[in-house]
Image: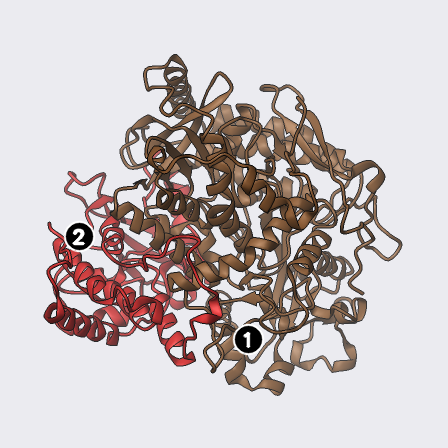
Chain colours: A red, B brown
Amino acid sequence: MRITLNVWRQKNARDAGGFEKYDCPNVSEDMSFLEMLDVVNEDLIAKGRDPIAFDHDCREGICGMCGFMISGVAHGPESGTTVCQLHMRKFKDGDELWLEPWRAKGFPIIRDLTVDRSALDRIVASGGFVSVHTGSAIDGNAIPVPKPNADLAMDAAQCIGCGACVAACPNASASLFTSAKISHLALLPQGQPERDRRAINMVERMNAEGFGHCTNIGECEAVCPKEIKIENIARMNRDYLCASFKKRPEVKRVED
Amino acid sequence: MKLDAHIPEGPIEKKWDTHRFKMKLVNPANKRKFTVIVVGTGLAGGAAAATLAELGYNVKAFCFQDSPRRAHSIAAQGGINAAKNYQNDGDSIYRLFYDTVKGGDYRAREANVYRLAQVSVNIIDQCVAQGVPFAREYGGVLANRSFGGAQVSRTFYARGQTGQQLLIGAYQALERQIGLGKVQMYARTEMLDVIVVDGVARGIVTRDLVTGKVEAHMGDAVALGTGGYGNVFFLSTNAKGSNATAVWRAHKHGALFGNPCYTQIHPTCIPVSGDYQSKLTLMSESLRNDGRVWVPKKAGDTRAPGAIPADERDYYLERRYPSFGNLVPRDVASRAAKAVCDEGRGVGPGGLGVYLDFADAIKRLGANTVAERYGNLFQMYERITGEDPYKVPMRIYPAVHYTMGGLWVDYNLMTTVPGLYAIGEANFSDHGANRLGASALMQGLADGYFVLPYTIGDYLATVKPGAVGLDHPEVKAALARVNDRTAKLLAIKGKRTVDSFHRELGKLMWDNCGMGRNKAGLEHNLKRIPELRAEFWQNVSIPGTGEEFNKELEKAGRVADFLELGELMCRDALHREESCGGHFREEYQTPDGEAARNDERFQYAAAWEWKGEGVTPVLHKEALNFEYVHPTQRSYK
């Protein structure tokens, strides 16, 4: 089949950028979307032009490295799927598509479809962990976890940190990402000792990184390739609120 | 050069304890004076960086991805082994040790494997404490599943995303140390050389992949947790970025390369669909717990699977290996699949596939239970192939998955370059000639959490911190080497893309150094690969410059290294005139087609020494002694 691509090309953060059109005449329906871009790139290189820069690594939908907007939808039209696992059989012959990078204040553009998502790492560094040194753990079965809780925690822990939720949100909020980590740990007994300070530190770090607030629009859940639910955001807000009331002076706040 | 594995004295169950007691310690107040460089942030590298920082060392950690959370450990699906015996089914440290040595076809070092089995129990405890959401029973205790090559249930799992959850556990521990300022993290940064001063590793040279800036980082020890080299084959289950550059540069600076020909071909991957194919996708081996593998009895039978009656199907694994059935180890399952396809009984386009059928499991357990166990894998399969495995059997075929070979290391995980360590898949140590399922995660975390943090202290206690500064002539020389190589690559301005060379190399390797190997094919590769390499250096086309975000330049550097490593793999495969584990030399097999080892001649680890461009490398041998698990022909019948 034949696909027309309009791809956002931007040499670096200082460049203004703009769309360029590419004609892809021989697309197989068994190709993944990224394999189609590989073919476009091979052709561009053969013509001595710069290939389209896009992030990708595992191509199995788990590393979270890939992702861009396809005609306004993060990771494209198939729900619960990263762009590397999106296959061309989901498109029709003659389709014209618009590819753009994640656009958010918290994600500066590096080149073309590639953005800097290190803000998400900094949110995790502010509290998305259990403070347990290697070697100090008790026997695994000494911490029983009810199966339903383990399952719910796993639902949240599946987040791959791709940033689609931020890109889809009109407020460029990182609430779904942040709440998935807060929920994962808040649902498990291991996460309880630091539950309050984790909620406060991570939410405040998220705000400091320039992400917007959640206004319950739900675009994030709609595009999330791991189908993380916005009930996690409710849990985060509850934990944040409770923690703010309970807060004692020794809880250190994250400064800008 | 004399290889000394530094295996501690004493009975095997005491070696690690005795060794830990004898090792020198670094005073807690002195630890902060030392800097350890950790390259790679997967299970091994991420766990090591976090743990070393917890101990008080300064750590500089590097990864080429945009975040340490994306290392390819994340893609491991099925699980992690540990000798917990929670199922009361007769498991023990000794049994895990025994299974791993046997599964490795008696080509691993016993002392390392025993230690691995010992610390496996600590890994589960550590990961649970970090909040890894392992699968649970209704009573709240940890659940287990079985895996290939074992008759006990010792595999812990988190749905089909165990690697992801374990890696995120390690990543969270690492981010905590980054937040505390104990780890300096360099993401989107690739290591391009080791700095060796007077024979000792003192630092690395890196390139910032966004700006192109090349710089040196000095440290008192360097640990490489950079994974395996399966991408030599172009098509593999590895991530697109997985590469051998760090280990290959270390090799060129004197680190011997152990058993490069030991490659694991995973039996359950989605078959290739076309020329544009960029990678292969694994379907977890855990599927073989409930899926039954079969092909039609008749060659050339093109009927739809549902139209083939039961008595015209050959459940060949159950037939050939009645006691292990569909759960034979990976090397055995892969070769059996190749054998039936070679007989013309393969299924799907091109006849390169076998069925993995869940119809019986769905009948026995119900679709819901099957979905609970494998739902995400079924979804992934459907996304890629457009077929619904609840209705039609999956089509699978073997694909390159893991490399048991890697940098040769001693019991302390140190390479033959003092101060340079290799951990996880990057080293060669624990899996012999074949790795059992759910053992890669175990080994990565064992090295990172529980082995390297001890053994590196023994070394650091003997060195003066910060002994070599950035102004040392060797540092300048290393920087110049890296810059020259980049300039040379960019100056070629040829006609062929990097990928076209990589695909050609991959095909040579798959055809002649893949599941079946023989003398003629390997000799062909040894002639052809140097020619391809020469063409690469004259005719590769890399657009752009070195001072920008340039993915083609990154790939070119990696492929240049694969073009050298591929040759070494073939050389090793040619010299090893026996079949063992993943290394199957067609000339050496038993009458019923099983691997025929030759213990008399080849019961050793092969460790190759780099001697320079175009010079034949030199083989060193580490004899392997089996005091506890006596080599027999592996039988899963």
In which chain is the residue bearing label 2? A
Give percent across and percent down for residue A202: 20, 59
Side (left or right) of B383 relative to B88: left
**In the image, is residue A55 above or below residue B349?**
above
**In the image, is residue B85 above or below residue B35?**
below
Q: Nearer the viewer, residue A234 or B234?
A: A234
**In the image, is residue B508 above or below residue B171?**
above
Which residue is painted at 73% across and 70% down in the image? Answer: B325
Label 1 secondary element: loop
Question: In the rendered image, which residue does mark 1 sit on?
Answer: B389
Foreground mark, 2 or 1? Answer: 2
Label 2 secondary element: loop
Question: In the rendered image, which residue does mark 2 sit on?
Answer: A106
Which residue is painted at 31% across and 64% down in the image? Answer: A76
Q: CA distance from mark 2 to mark 1?
A: 40 Å
Answer with the quarter of the image where residue B267 lies.
bottom right
Judge whether residue B487 can be spotted in this image: yes
Give percent across and percent down for residue B64: 38, 41
Which residue is painted at 62% across and 27% down in the image? Answer: B530
Q: Amino acid at mark 1?
A: Pro
